[in-house]
Image (cartoon, rainbow, N blue to C red):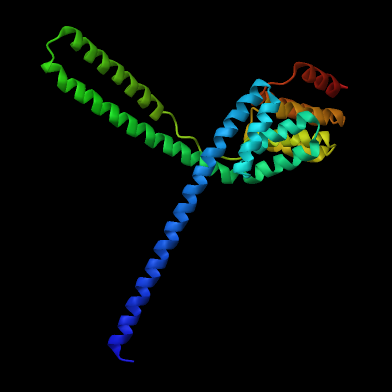
Amino acid sequence: MRKRECVLILVVLFVLMGTISSFGQRDFLMEERKLVEKFKFADKHFTKGKEYFIKGNIAKAEKELGKCLEIMPEHADALYFLSQIDYKKGNFDQSLERIEKAKANFDFIAKFYTFTHQTRLESLREEKQKLEMQVMHLQDRLPSITDQDERQRVESAIANTRNDISIIESRLREPIPPVLHTPADYFYVHGNILFKLKRYQDAHDQYVEAIKQDSKHGNAYNNLINLYFIAKDYQGALAYLKAAEANGAQINPELKKAVEEAAKK
């Protein structure tokens, strides 16, 4: 084969490889966009479900959270709240299954929260830019306005728009959320479920992990201290009581009194 033909074949191969790579990248980005849209759609149901849960309307909360999972089964926070609903109903095995899935999926879903936060910031910047353009347009009109009432309306519109810009600027100054890790409450709820299933050592380990994530998690400290108290390990209970107070966690006064009295004997 002549040299010129070899060079031509190599050029064609490089072009084909570049084209394939381009299509692959495009397909990847399209898949990412589809996932983001799916998350946004699912998250609307999650938000409603969470609001119903906080208000104590468990039936409606369960319905909305179920819709969320139908759209995106990996939605960790929906699984977390459904786990608590199962716990309230006494369905501890299902509750355990859901909290374990929630923890397994949290890193995956956290990426979408980060992405939507960045999208929100971009939207706010675009809105601010539009409002600034409106202010400039209104200010340009002022010199040509002779009617006093019309001038007051324009000046009022400028003031209101500037106020809207200030609100947006304050939102833009809000701190960027840190890299998300599995929340302490996930471990706390997991511990409660395991306690109900009489898996006390596993429950203990989950409470310890909750405290590692949030050193002021009073509920986790209370339950952990109670575990030691039930086991009659009063010195262990006292040690965690002191650690809780050192970290500013709120401890049940009656539990504290019982532990301190038992530790003296």
* Residue 35 against residue 244 in the figure, above or below: below
Q: Residue furthest bottom?
A: 1
| Residue in front for this viewpoint, 193 or 207 | 193
Rendering coords of residue 68 (x, y %): 61, 38
Asked whether, in this view, residue 72 is left or right of residue 155, the answer is right
- Tell me which corner region of the image, top left, top right, bottom left or bottom right, holds residue 67: top right
Asked whether, in this view, residue 174 is left or right of residue 257, the answer is left
- Tell me which corner region of the image, top left, top right, bottom left or bottom right, holds residue 126: top left
Q: Residue furthest top?
A: 148
Q: Does the image show residue 235?
A: no
- Tell me which corner region of the image, top left, top right, bottom left or bottom right, holds residue 246: top right
Q: For the N terminus, give its image quadrant.
A: bottom left
Rendering coords of residue 32 (x, y %): 48, 50
Residue drawn at the location 83% of the way across and 39% of the way down: 199
Number of marks in the rendered image:
0
Q: Does the image show residue 197?
A: yes
Residue drawn at the location 11% of the way across and 17% of the way down: 144
Rendering coords of residue 184 (x, y %): 65, 34
Residue drawn at the location 80% of the way across and 27% of the way down: 226
Q: For the C terminus, give its image quadrant.
A: top right
Rendering coords of residue 186 (x, y %): 67, 36
Asked whether, in this view, residue 169 is left or right of residue 224, the answer is left
| Residue in front for this viewpoint, 14 or 240 | 14
* Residue 144 against residue 35 in the figure, above or below: above
* Residue 149 against residue 248 in the figure, above or below: above
| Residue in front for this viewpoint, 77 or 31 | 31
* Residue 221 against residue 25 in the figure, above or below: above
